[in-house]
Image: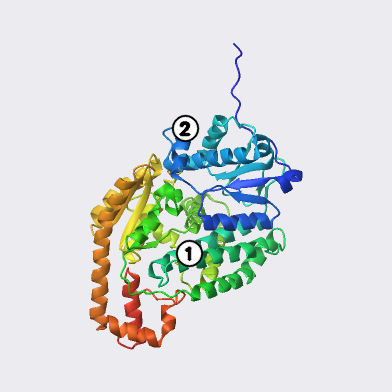
Amino acid sequence: MEVLDYRAYRPRAFTKEERSKTTILFGGLTWKHERLIQASLENMGYRAKPLPEIRRVDLDMGKEFIDVGACCPTTFTAGNLARALMQIEKSEGRERLKDNYVFVTIGACGPCRFGQYHESYERVLEGLNLRDFRLFLLDLLQMEQSVEGGGLEISMPLTLGLVYAMFIGDLLTDMEYATRPYEVEKGKTDRVLRDSVELIYEKLRKRPIRGKKLGSLLWHLTTDYFTKALKEVKELWDEIEVDRLRVKPTVKITGEFWLQTHEGEGNYNIKRWLEQEGAQVVPPPVAVWMDYLINMELFKLEDKREFVKMYPLKKAIISLFAWLYRYTYNRLRNALNDIPNPLPDQRALKELARPYFYYRLTGGEGHMLIGKALYAYRNKHAHMICELSPYGCLPNTMSVGAMAKVLGDYPDLLYAPIEIKGDAEVHALSRCQMILTEAKRRAKEEFEEVLQRTKLKIEDIKEFEAKKPEIRRATYRIPHYGYAGTSANYVMHVAKLMGRV
Ligand code: SF4
């Protein structure tokens, strides 16, 4: 019997000459983020295409190919890749699949399976007998890198294009969830959202390439190219009329990175489901995670300050980097009249989580899961936290365990930890519904209280709205007056405008 040595997967080179005929496949985020990432890649001369949207069938397919103990996001995404490759093979043939497509994924070092996703994807290639299909792993934390053969080069302009795609994807998602529950004309938010994504897609695709390294960075930090584009987007959202007198509980989504940002069957479409159940969802921006990674570098440096050469300089560089990151996000937010939420303060998240979770225990969301829940609760940003925990996730199990103590200290915090297995929808949603019932009661109570406090009646507010219709625009900003619900803050705002308080 012939004995074959095990050989680690090593993709064939992807050369520069192949670029024009090779499509880069990628996935893992919402359709909005993926469409904008596609634009950033096309802008740099690549052909790019997101994987098909995640379906329930991907979970079953993933289970066939990879380790059965894998966490639910790994299983879903591995199954999704398998389904995409099978579809392309069916429509274009095996040889074209191998020659004209590559799949690119990212990974990072650490204790969770995020560092091993590519291993699961390699099992998919083995299972499909496609070991000569090219799959490339990029390092999330490297601004500049390239794949073997130079067919894909992550340069400064491309990295910055991807960062803007991520930021704008987040901001549009925030606009979407803040508007849809209150839209007067059903379906208008989704239509405007699609038009906005296409508008930004075109802008990103035509983005001028100025400079290579520092020049490119400076251009991105100072240009009004993106803020102008977002002002055009704002004009589209100006046309959406909203009724903020609909009393709705605010539900903040937290949890594992992929599950919380995902919109689809991978998390039982829970955000849409919550909206159908009468809630306003606060979605988690992807940008928070990058902010966390940047700030973790700063915190680690501070820990070992006595042993670090040129500590003040190194600290100043990372702090400047962290500041520029938030400055850029806020600049883009500002073009949308600050309707999207700001990024939470990472130092505050760390401090809030400190009594419960040591911040150096990284993996998954680390201490952020606890920090974000307490941040939203203490600042009255939500009536309820819905935390999406993947089946088979070690980092998340640690956070959920620590949350038991948090809930002991904050018994009033409405917290719904939902385990997502992918195939236990009724169980998960009914658990969420129980806590949502209490959140609805609190939203109503808060609304009644503000009406009493301001001595306003619904008819008074409607009369005022008729005289000042601009306050019913989706882009009209309602300040936060310390209430968790939009409707309560709205009543207080109207009362202020009317001079009642
Ligand atoms: S955080 Fe958990 S669910 Fe997410 S990749 Fe890591 S192990 Fe999997």
Q: Position of residue 64 (x, y in %)?
A: 47, 32
Which SS class for mark 2? helix
> Residue 18, relative to residue 143: is it above or below?
above
Residue at (51% x, 42% y) in the render: 80
Marker count (numbered)? 2
Specify whether 65 is left or right of 421.
right
Does mark 1's beta carbon lie closer than 8 Å to ligand 1?
Answer: no
Query: Badge 2: few (under 14), some or many (20 or more) residues near its Cα, within 10 Å?
Result: some
Q: Position of residue 35 (x, y in %)?
A: 57, 56
Q: Position of residue 417 (x, y in %)?
A: 32, 50
Give whichever of 403, 48 is nearer the camera. Answer: 48
Q: Farthest front residue? A: 91
* Kind of residue sitting beneath label 1: Asp
Q: Quadrant of residue 85?
A: top right
Q: Position of residue 423 (x, y in %)?
A: 37, 42
> Which mark, by number, is residue 190?
1
Residue at (44% x, 62% y) in the render: 345
Pointer 2 residue: 64
Say if residue 187 shows up in the picture.
yes
Q: Farthest right residue? A: 17
Specify whether 267 is left or right of 38.
left
> Which mark, by number, is residue 349?
none
C-alpha gap between disc 2 and disc 1: 35 Å
* Kind of residue sitting beneath label 2: Glu
Give whichever of 467, 386 is nearer the camera. Answer: 467
Classify the position of the C terminus by image quarter: bottom left
Q: Quadrant of ligand 1?
A: top left
> Residue 222, relative to residue 296: is it above or below?
below
Closer mark to the observer between disc 2 and disc 1: 1
Which SS class for mark 1? helix
Give whichever of 354, 490 is nearer the camera. Answer: 490
Residue at (71% x, 63% y) in the render: 210
